[in-house]
Amino acid sequence: MEAAMDLMRRMPPSLSQNALSSLLALLPEHSPELLSRVDQPLQVANDAYSGKDFLLCDYNRDGDSYRSPWSNKYYPPLEDGAQPSTDLRKLEVEANDIFAIYRDQYYEGGISSVYMWEPDEGEGFASCFLIKKDGSQTGQGRRGFLQQGVWDAIHVVEVGAEDEGTAHYCLTSTVMLSMTTSDKPSGTFKLSGSITRQMAADMLVADGHLSNMGRMIEEMESKLRNALDQVYFGKTREMVFTLRQPIGVLTSTSATGQSLQKSIVNDMHR
């Protein structure tokens, strides 16, 4: 099991679904654990009752059916599917409306879903905030020369029982990024990866659960975006510039610039 998890941590998001299917075939006895521990790129389904799209994950799955946060119905239909309590369902509906505004402001579109449930043991509740932004050529938000570009964000928040006006919040966030550019001058370039981080805090319940969770998610997403920029884009840029320095940044003091200068002078003296 540890070897399987180690393999999945090194697998690019674009290949994770095929890799997970292969592992499930090889390790059928570990299927429940693999499905619960491995984050996969989010899939999209349509709620025929509300006409809205929603995201599929392990937290809204019951058997082979998935619950829509908009209508609270399962697709395909399921008679006795798990449902949140009445109070938690009201909080879930409010969270979906607020998170949709957050998605539009930060992502300029995309699809979002929020799911909430009671834990099997102990008090409190848990929630999952999902965002998918497809910037592919055929997607709803193409940018620049992107042929394929998908951002999947999964935020799971565990909220402990209230104790003297405060509650303990534990956030686990995963972002999966996969992108491909294709342009005649630069050619084809592919980049994909994932990053997972955790944070915890004790906060006043009087401020509201949604407000507390929202602040944590906003702060975490900012940290994850900065980390992705430094780790993936920063390191890639450093490697490319080391292998081939762009003509636009050549100077007479750089090694490449001096070599080019000597070559030109030698050609002129011939």
Image (cartoon, grey):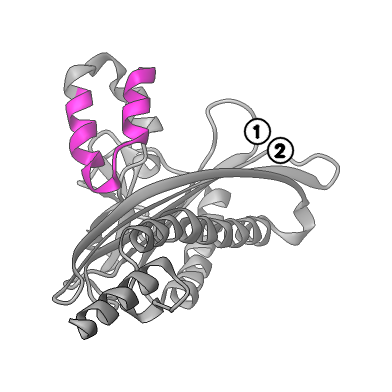
The numbered dot on residue 161 is 2
Viewer-proximal residue among 103 and 205: 103
Q: Confirm whether residue 2 shows in the render.
A: yes
> Does the magenta stretch mainly form a helix, a strand or a loop?
helix
User: In the displayed structure, does residue 125 sit left or right of residue 243?
Assistant: right
9 relative to 84, above or below: above
Left or right relative to 197: residue 167? right
Residue 58, disc: none
The quarter of the rendered structure image containing the C terminus is bottom left
Instruction: Verify whether residue 120 appears in magenta.
Output: no
Counting residues from the N terminus, which is met first, the one under dot 2 or under dot 1?
1
Residue that sits furthest to the bottom in the current view: 268
Q: Is residue 11 magenta?
A: yes
Residue 34: where, in percent of width, then height?
A: 33, 27
Lateral position of residue 61 relative to residue 221, left or right: left
Residue at 45%, 60% in the rendered image:
234
From the viewer's side, name the closer residue of 232 and 21: 232
The answer to which image quadrant residue 211 occupies is bottom right
In the picture, which quadrant includes the N terminus?
top left
View extreme (right): residue: 164
Q: On screen, 192 above or below 122?
A: below
Furthest-left residue in this view: 184
CA gap, disc 2 to disc 1? 5 Å
Q: Eyeballing the image, is 151 above or below 16?
A: below
Taking the image as drawn, is residue 171 in sight? no
Coordinates of residue 159 in the picture (x, y in percent): 64, 42
Q: Are marks 2 and 1 in contact (CB under 8 Å)?
A: yes
Q: Give the magenta range.
A: 1-24
The answer to which of 16 and 158 lies nearer the viewer is 16
- The x, y position of residue 165, in whole percent, is 83, 47
Residue at horizontal 40 percent and vertical 41 percent from the top: 59
Residue hosting label 1: 123
